[in-house]
Structures are given as structure tokens and as C-alpha cells.
Image (cartoon, helix red, strand yellow):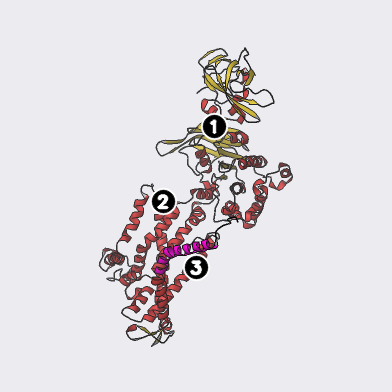
Amino acid sequence: MNDSLTLDTAEASRNENVETAREASSIELHGLHKRFGRHTVALNGVDLTIEAGEFFTLLGPSGCGKTTLLRILAGLEEADDGRLAIGGKDITEVPPHKRSVNTVFQSYALFPHLSVRENLAFGLKMRGLPPVEREARVAKIAEFIKLGDLVARRIDQLSGGQRQRIALARALVNEPDVLLLDEPLSALDAGLRSQLQVELLRVQKRLGMTFVFVTHDQQEAMVMSDRIAVLNGGVIQQVGPPREVYEHPVNAFVARFMGHDNLYPITARQGNRLTTPLGELVADQAGEGDLLLIRPETLDLLPGEVAGDNHLLAVVNERLYRGSHAEYRLEVGAGTLQATLNNRGRHLPEVGDRVTVTVAPDDLVTLSE
Amino acid sequence: MAYTGVTPSARSRGMVREARHLLFTVAPGASWIVIFLVLPAAYLMGVAFMTNGPYGLPQMPLSLESFRRLAGFGFLGWSPGNLYTLLRSLWQTLVSTGLVVLVAYPIAYYISTCRETWRPIMLLLVVVPSWTNQVIRTFGWMNLLAPGTPLSELAESLGLIAPNMGLYPSNFAVTLGLVYNFLPFMVLPLYAAFEKLDIAQVEAAQDLFASPVRAFWHAVFPQTLPGLLAGIVLVAIPAFGMYVIPELLGGGKGMMLGNLVANQFAGGANWPLGAAGAILMLIATFIGLFVMRRIGKRLGGGEEVVI
């Protein structure tokens, strides 16, 4: 029942006692290096500035260093080299229990021998707040996250979604400068997951707190984030708002990780005219790169053979009808191309049809390997 | 008429089969327990309420004489000897169990942090000494602690013991022997608890402003509590009834309840008194287990943690 609770923003803005008076804090990282053992490089020179009040996501495949970076922020891991400052104060050598940073762990890491209420009050108790104030703050956060009667339960009486909420509340109740979230939704099923994504986003916007979020799911990253940093091999590949990272990836890794498959080598170029295995294409912003990215949703399919710039002849190899849209795999020149067509009630070509693929010159992006 | 299910005769045949099944599976174990545990315990109970006869053998009529003697009332009025023995047993159990915990905790933790290939070997090193006969190992300690040995002379020069007294026989030697003997019984369950320790909880505690000491107390200790309580049960109960170690290392002033009981069936020869002593031990053990259960429940957040 409690899984279905959502935060009502209109009600929240009337409810003034939940607003935090704290200023959000920025984060600055300089030249962070971290190795495990002799061979495993987790971070290889990370420089990053996270703005105050930002929902910032560290995105990358497993082993890319995103979790290590988060753990260094929490103080659970020590960087071999580099500096770390939160709110302008250098905290590189501050132990975890003295940092005003709290974490929502992937496994939630709730204390099973304590009740929900005791779990929520744990941080406040460790900081020496008197019991009366602890109870008031716990009651406030329980109302804020809408925990209802969950606070009286034991941890083993909670569902996954409820545990996730408690873990979030247990961190938020301390009103940290920065909240760190280590794949907090990865253990939940898809429906609950997207619901909690929205909830988490609303909580962050209402509190205006700096959130650093770790995930390997690019969809999740795009939904939630103000800005995304894509990591690979302990190096930041690209930092930017979701649209920029998705639409203008700086290299092939970022492009592929953001879900792009239509990447083609540029074999020759004459001004804006690029030669690719698909054929000749005109790109408005033909940059330096030697790869061409064509996003499936920028393509259009015309029935029959139509001549013109950026008009390529194609045969439909495969069509996946998904209701709101259809995904196509097309044979074009010496390559294959994926296209996504919105279903606006127009004609959707069938398998085997000969069609013409068109793309606008300003939708083509070049990038380097 | 349609076939609706199992006919009565088939059902009764099924029950017979089930009964026969039970007889073959449960009966051997059950009869073993009845013959070697229930009957002797009942016999012991009976003996305790009988009168001491010639050669220490029990005879009629029934009486509470043994329990009076056990409480210290003899021919010459009340003497505190047995009470001291009981208190000494409790004290030795308490101290040695406490010391075993203090020694075993770091060992178990250390082994759990070792590389996986090393762990079985290190556990083996802890366990291997107990493959030797307990009596032989205790004799070993006698030789190490006797007057004139390096350890005794060191203790003498530090002024810990009177000249030429040796570290054995003494209560200290008994404690040492008990700690040495029972260490593996604490290390193994603690190791099992440490091995499945959820490190994330420790990190969560640190993340929530707990200093290392408090993180240990709030996140490590509760997780190892089941192992700790199991270890305490495995150590404290046999230690409380221990016979060999106080017999060999304790001397006259190191006697424990186990020796008191054993003596009544041997030299001193008073079976009813020995039986009464055994029942006292049993009662004390049950009280101890009950207390442990309560502690486990309290610290374990209402969950059963004790075996």
C-alpha cells in the first residue's frame, strides 16, 4: 500500500515546515587517482565540479570507477592522489563520520536489529542530538517521505520499495550538505523503479539539496539528472546536461553507452559532404571526427525511390512494431541502419519494402573514436 | 458413481505405512536418547533423593539429606566448603569465558579478513591442538607452569607469586587451562559470523557519523552476536562442569563443581550427594541458558539469536 504513495508537490509547497534552511553545497574534485592492488585502476585523474543544488549523475558501465568516486566522496575510500572539497572546504583527509555527507547504499544497508524508527534516528543519535529533537526530526522526515506507519515496523517486515524509502529517509534526516546515491533503485522491479525515480527527483527539487547519483542505466540518468558525467576506465568521457550528452556525444564510447548504434566511419570528405558505407551524406556541423552518428529518431522513411541530398535508397529488413512507434532495421548501401518512426497514423513500411531514408543535415553529428 | 478420492481402507493403509516409516526413521535415535539420556537422568534424579549407604551406594529411605549436605550442613554443623566450590565454578566459568571471548574475537576477525585460500589453514591451526587428548595437553601446561620453569621464574621475578611456589597449582592455572582448552569453540562460531558480515552496514554506520568504535558496537557487534552467544554456550557450559583441568591444575583450592561430583562417585563415595551435585549443575546450566536467551532477545531486537 505504501509503495503507491507519491509526493504531491502542490501540497508540499504549502507545507512549509519541510523546507530546509541550509544552503546547498558544491563539490570540487581535483586530479583524483585511485588504484586497487597493482593493476586495477579505478580512477585515473578525475577533475569535476558539481554545482550546489544540482542533481548530478555518474554514469558508466560496471568497473568504470563511478562507485569508487562516490565512495571517495563519502570518505569510505581514500584517494591515492588528488583533492576533494565540499562547500569550498577541503575534506580530503576528513574521516567519513565527520563529513556532512550521507549515502543511500545500493543494498540499503539498514540495521536489521533496529526498528525503522531507530534506523532513522541513528545518524542524529551519533551526532549527539537530544532524544526530543531526534524524535521531532524523525517524525518530520517520516511525514516528508510519507512513511506513514512504517516507522513502527521491523526492517524484515518491509518490502524492497519500502526499504528503499527508509534508506533515503535515514540519509535525508541528517540534512547533509550532499546526498550520495549508489544505484539506489537497481534492486527494484521496473514499475516501482520508474515511480521512485520520479519521487526521488521531486524530493531533490523540493529540498534543493546537492544529489550525486550513480547508475549504469542511461535512461535513468537522462530522466533524473541536471547534468551527467559519463565515465569509462576511470576517466570522465563527457560532462553535460542529458540532451547534450545524448545528442552530441563526444566519442564513440559515450555514443554507444547512450544507446546509439548507428555509427559509421567517414571514409572521405569534401567540405560538408561525407562519404560513409551508407553512401554520401551532407552534414551541417561536420566537425573533426572520423565517425558519423545518425540517431534513429531523426530519420524519415519515404515510400519508393526519391532522389535528393541525404536521400538514401533502402530495403526494410526488419520491423518491430511497438504501438507508439516502430523500429526499423534497414539495408542501406554497404551497411545497415536503424530507424525509429513515430506512429502518427501514417503509412508504416513493411518488411521487404523499398524505401528512401531521409535525414536533415543539422541532425548529423560527427565524433571521434 | 464417480471416484471421489482415497477410500477409507486405502487411507488406513497409508497411515500404517506412515507409522512404519516413522518407526524406522525416528525410533533408533529416540531409543538411543531414552536409553542413554532419559533413563540415566531419571535414575540420577532418584539417587539424589535416596540415603547414603555403606560404600557410598544409595539406599532407601528417600530423604533430602544429600541436598542438606550439598548446602554445607554436615556432622559438624554448617561449613562453606561446597558453597565456595560452587562460587569458584561460577567465577572460573565467568572469567575464562570472558577471556576466551577477548582472545577469540580478534582471531576470528583476522581470519575472516585473510585471503580465502588461507582461511581453512588458519582455522585448522586453531582446531588442531584440540585433536590431542585433553589430559595430555593439560599435563603439558603442568610442565610449563610448575615451580622452577621459565614462566614461573619470570612470574617470581616480577613479584607476582611467592618464591618457589610455581604458577601451578593455582586458580590462575585453571583459568589459563580453561581459556586454552575452549578457545576453538569460540573462534569457530565467531568466524562463521564474521565471514558473512555485511560490510555495508559498517560503512552505513560510519556514513551516519559513527566513530570507528561506535561503528563496531552498532554495526559489527550486533551482526556477530549470534556467533558470540553460540560460542558462549559452547564454552561456558562445559567449562562450568569441567573436571580434568581443575583436577590437574587446580590443586586442593582450585576444585570446581565437576570435581566435587566426581569425587562422590569415586574416593569420597557418596552417590546421593554426587547425584544432588549433578542436578545442581543441571539447574545452574538451565538458568544460564535462560539468561542468555533473554540477553540474545534484547540485543537482537526481539529476534531469537541463541541456539
Q: Eyeballing the image, is A323 above or below B28?
A: above
Determine if the magenta segment contains residue B24.
Answer: yes
Determine the secondary structure under disc 1: strand
Give the farthest residue toward the left. Answer: B148
Question: As shown in the figure, which amino acid type bears the numbered disc 3?
Answer: Val
Determine if the magenta segment contains residue B192.
Answer: no
Residue lying at 63% horizontally and 54% vertically, measured from the top left? A151
Determine the secondary structure under disc 3: helix
Question: As shown in the figure, which amino acid type bears the numbered disc 1?
Answer: Val
Seen from the viewer's position, the closer of residues A338 and A223 is: A338
Same chain letter for marks 3 and 2? yes
Q: Earlier in the sequence, mark 3 or mark 2?
A: 2
- Residue B59 seen anywhere in this rendered image of the structure: yes
Same chain letter for marks 3 and 1? no
Q: Residue B126: where, in percent of width, then height? A: 35, 56
Seen from the viewer's position, the closer of residues B33 and A243 is: B33
Residue lying at 54% horizontally and 47% vertically, measured from the top left? B207
Q: Which mark is residue B112?
A: 2
Judge left or right: residue B44 versus residue A32: left
Q: Residue B85: where, in percent of width, then height? A: 39, 76
The residue indicated by pointer 1 is A230
Q: How far is mark 3 from mark 2, CA to CA?
A: 29 Å
Q: Quadrant of the N terminus of chain B?
A: bottom right
Q: Residue B9: where, in percent of width, then height? A: 52, 63
Q: Which mark is residue B291?
A: 3
Q: How far is mark 1 from mark 2, CA to CA?
A: 36 Å
- Residue B95 seen anywhere in this rendered image of the structure: no
Question: As shown in the figure, which amino acid type bears the numbered disc 2?
Answer: Ser
